[in-house]
Amino acid sequence: MKRLNQHRSEVGLRLDKLKEFIELNQQQITKITSLNSILQNQLKSLNFEIAQNSKRWTPADYEIFLKFNEHVTKIIKFIEQLNIFIDNFAANNFADVILMKYGLDHDPNNVILESLQLDSTNSLSKDIYKYFKPAIFTGAVLFTSKKSQFIYNQLDLNRNNTRMKRLKSNFDYANQMKLMVSNQTPMPESFDNDDYVKYLSDSIIDIYNSHPVPTLVLFNSLQLIESVYHNILINNKVPHIFASGISGSQEKIIRKFQETKNPVILGANGFWEGIDFPNNYLKSVIITRLPFAAPSNPIAKARSSYLRKEKKNPFISYALPKAIMDLNQGMGRLLRHENDYGTITILDNRLVTRKYGEQILRSFNPDLKIITGDIENITKENKTFFDSKENDKLL
């Protein structure tokens, strides 16, 4: 039995089991399809009768009719989409991975099926690119290194006939940002490891209180966020703290964040990319862990299996470059405007203890100042940076 819960918001479905389920329930699927056709005809007849007797209905009646129509139409469209999914799946097993996951409302009674193809070779060039003039891709973190093949594979591009141009950043990294990396990290990095939860909670509190500013703390796990959130609340040393999965939707959290003095967000998922805060508002980004996908993640498991069959190293060819891109996306939340400034703290010593950490560091802007040390040293550097910025304002 596959189950979703508050923390496990998606699970992978075995393709053979899904096919078996469809075959075993084909009679019921056929019956639902037939009933859906009847429902469509009944709705048409009802709407015709309502239109024919329009003088009998009040505005309140029409509002009821409208809501009823919307509800029934959703049911009809859902069954139609389900049939399209089943037909495509039965025809050629069109996906490498099928996920069952929450909808946008995170309602456990509202789940969706999502299909993914792991191999994009020739698919984009065949189905998309040929209908357009040469495509132009722009982005701040497209390339993890000059030699990386990752983005070419993801976009189904031939490196030999693709031109790449790097534009100089308009940020002064040497003066606008300071990057600090902790050289001490308890292992394992689990939500039920009391030492690790205490390490993160105490580090966030110490960094924040060295110079309180609007702070975004990025996590890879909602379970870990919950543990750290409650640990920080117990300490009562951060006046305003909001957390993914606890304080409401992402939009609600961002709104509260912008309305509060020197708040802290503990964020996951969508907080790593695609969000902008007001000009010169966000001052501190704390990254709790390098954003590698958990080995238990259904997509990561399926992709690793696929790459091994292709005689490729899953870590080198996918996991590492993907993590580099995600890390740079998270760091990119800080500087969005020319007059922004602040600090970034990474509480993961693998950046300085593992060989692949060198490759990650090389992906950062060469002008970026990087400080390595324990939390005590990091808090001093954090305070020194912001004190210097405040002194500059006074001059």
Image (tube, rainbow, N blue to C red):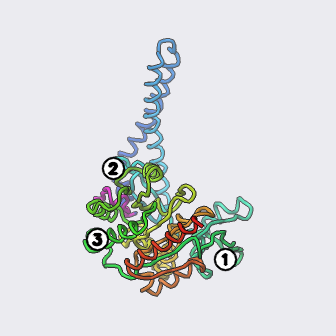
User: Do we see residue 149 in this rendering?
Assistant: no
Mark 3 and mark 2 lie on one chain; the one further toward the N terminus is: 2
Q: Position of residue 46 (x, y in %)?
A: 46, 23
Residue density around tag 2, few if under 14, some if 14–19, many if 20 or more, within 10 Å: some
Which three-letter amino acid code belongs to the residue tagged 1?
A: Arg
Label 1, secondary structure: give it. helix
The segment highlighted magenta reads 1-14
Mark 1 and mark 2 lie on one chain; the one further toward the N terminus is: 2
Task: Look at the picture and state if 300 lies above or below 22.
Answer: below
Q: Which residue is mark 1?
A: 159
Which three-letter amino acid code belongs to the residue tagged 2?
A: Pro
Kindly report the secondary structure that dominates the magenta region of the rendered protein. loop
Label 2, secondary structure: give it. loop
Q: Is residue 180 left or right of residue 130?
A: left
User: Along the line of sight, which residue is nearer the eye, 223 or 263?
Assistant: 263
Residue density around tag 1, few if under 14, some if 14–19, many if 20 or more, within 10 Å: few
